[in-house]
Structure formats: structure tokens, C-alpha cells
């Protein structure tokens, strides 16, 4: 009886007309170019999808906190931490709106910034906006926790919801910054 556990696997010969790679049977330079184009397209679309997520979440964080007015001490504008999260949520919304418009124009074949400049704008803008979102939500967390210890009500629940949405907007922007940094690092200067 043959020893199946110690047997060396033998590769089956390729079928007629089939190539050894995922680029439709193309090997060499053509296959490498096609793979690079597909990767670049995937990076462009995922960056846009992450910015769209950040757009929706920052809009929701801004709106939930801006509508958080329940009278007396339960008004967001009485607390600078909450005004800060509203301002940064609005800033992130405007930034992601402009970026989505820019990427939409580029994906439909329109004119964009110079390639290197566009990548720098993407990377720096994503980084700065993500850090501002993290700063705003980390400033609002302590006051919300103190308020929730005394009274758990609609005001603190709305504040917590806004902070949560700001955090998820931060995650989207941080991932978008990673993709932008990868694209910037892979940029050829020829």
C-alpha cells in the first residue's frame, strides 16, 4: 500500500490554452500590466467607498449633535466639547464631499490635479481630517461619561450616538489615509 501521508504532490499539467495566471492566460509584461491596472482600480474604488462611508457618518455625527437640544442644561451648544464635535463633523462632511466630487470627476474621465499633487492632497487631507475627528470625539467622551453617571437621558444618548458615528467616520478616514499612503508610496516619478 502506498504511503499517502509522505507522498509528494504532483501538479496536473495545464489545460490546453490555459495560462498560469489570473490575467486571462497572459503571462509576462501584459499580465503584469493588467494586474496593476486591476489593483489600481480596486484602490481607487475602495478609497472612494471609504470616503463615502466617512461622508455619511460625519454627516450623521454632525446632525445628531446639532439637533441635540432638549432645554435647560441639555443643549449641545452649552458645552465646548460638543460644539467642537459639531464643527469637526461639518468640516469632515465638507472635505469628504469635495473629495467624492473630485474622484467622481476623475473616474468619469474628467481632468484632475497632477498625479503627485492629487495623491498628496488625498493623503494629507485624509490624515488631518481623521486626526481632527479623533480629537473631537476624544474631547467629548469624558463629559458624556460624567453626565451619564448622573442622569442617563435622551441628551446623553444622542451625544453618545454622535460620538459613535464620529468614531466610525474616523475609522473610514484612517483606512482611506492608509490607502492614500500606499498609492503615494507606489507612485512612479518617471
Image (cartoon, grey):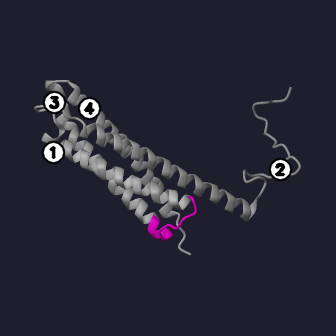
Helix, strand or loop at mark 3: helix
Rendering coords of residue 53 (x, y %): 43, 44
At 55% across and 70% down in the image, what residue appears?
188
Instruction: Tell me what residue is drawn at x 40 percent, y 43 percent.
Output: 56
Question: 85 or 38, which is in the foreground?
Answer: 85
In terms of secondary structure, where does tag 4 sit? helix
Q: Which mark is residue 107?
A: none
Query: Above or below — where is 116 with respect to 125?
Result: below
Secondary structure mostly seen in magenta is loop
To which residue does mark 2 refer? 18
Q: Mark 1 points at which residue?
A: 80
Pointer 2 with pointer 1, Cβ within 8 A: no
Report, in whole angstroms, how far the alpha carbon at label 1 lies from the one at label 4: 16 Å
Which is nearer the N-term, disc 4 or disc 2? 2
- Residue 186 is inside the magenta segment: no
Mark closer to the chain start, 1 or 3: 1
Classify mark 2: residues with Cα within 10 Å, few (<14), some (14-19) or many (20+). Answer: few
**Label 1 with label 3: CB-CB less than 8 Å:** no
Tell which circle, 2 or 1, labels the residue nearer the N-terminal end.
2
The magenta stretch is: 108-118
Q: Which of the labelled discs sits on residue 147, or is there none?
A: 3
Q: Which of marks 3 and 4 is nearer the N terminus?
A: 3
Q: Position of residue 144 (x, y in %)?
A: 20, 34
Within 10 Å of the Cα at label 4, are there few (<14), some (14-19), or many (20+) other Cα atoms?
many
- In front: label 3 or label 4: 4
Spatial CA distance of label 3 from label 2 is: 66 Å
User: In the structure shown, which secondary structural element does the residue marked by tag 2 occupy?
Assistant: loop
Question: Which residue is located at x 16 percent, y 30 percent?
Answer: 147
Q: For marks 2 and 1, give the one nearer the viewer.
A: 1
Image depth: mark 3 or mark 2 in front: 3
Residue at the spot 43% in from the left edge and 57% down from the top edge: 99
Amino acid at each position: 500500500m502506498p504511503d499517502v501521508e509522505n507522498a509528494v504532490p504532483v501538479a496536473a499539467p495545464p489545460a490546453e490554452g490555459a495560462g498560469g495566471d489570473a490575467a486571462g492566460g497572459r503571462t509576462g509584461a501584459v499580465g503584469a500590466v493588467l494586474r496593476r491596472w486591476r489593483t489600481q482600480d480596486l484602490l481607487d474604488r475602495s478609497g472612494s467607498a471609504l470616503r463615502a462611508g466617512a461622508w455619511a457618518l460625519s454627516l450623521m455625527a454632525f446632525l445628531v449633535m446639532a439637533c441635540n437640544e432638549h432645554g435647560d442644561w441639555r443643549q449641545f451648544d452649552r458645552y465646548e466639547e460638543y460644539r467642537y464635535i459639531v464643527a469637526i463633523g461639518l468640516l469632515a462632511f465638507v472635505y469628504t464631499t469635495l473629495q467624492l466630487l473630485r474622484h467622481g470627476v476623475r473616474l468619469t474621465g474628467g481632468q484632475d490635479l497632477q498625479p503627485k499633487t492629487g495623491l498628496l492632497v488625498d493623503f494629507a487631507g485624509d490624515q488631518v481630517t481623521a486626526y481632527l475627528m479623533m480629537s473631537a470625539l476624544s474631547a467629548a467622551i469624558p463629559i458624556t461619561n460624567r453626565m451619564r453617571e448622573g442622569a442617563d437621558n435622551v441628551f446623553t444618548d444622542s451625544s453618545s450616538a454622535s460620538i459613535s458615528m464620529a468614531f466610525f467616520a474616523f475609522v473610514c478616514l484612517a483606512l482611506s489615509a492608509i490607502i492614500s499612503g500606499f498609492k503615494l508610496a507606489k507612485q512612479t516619478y518617471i
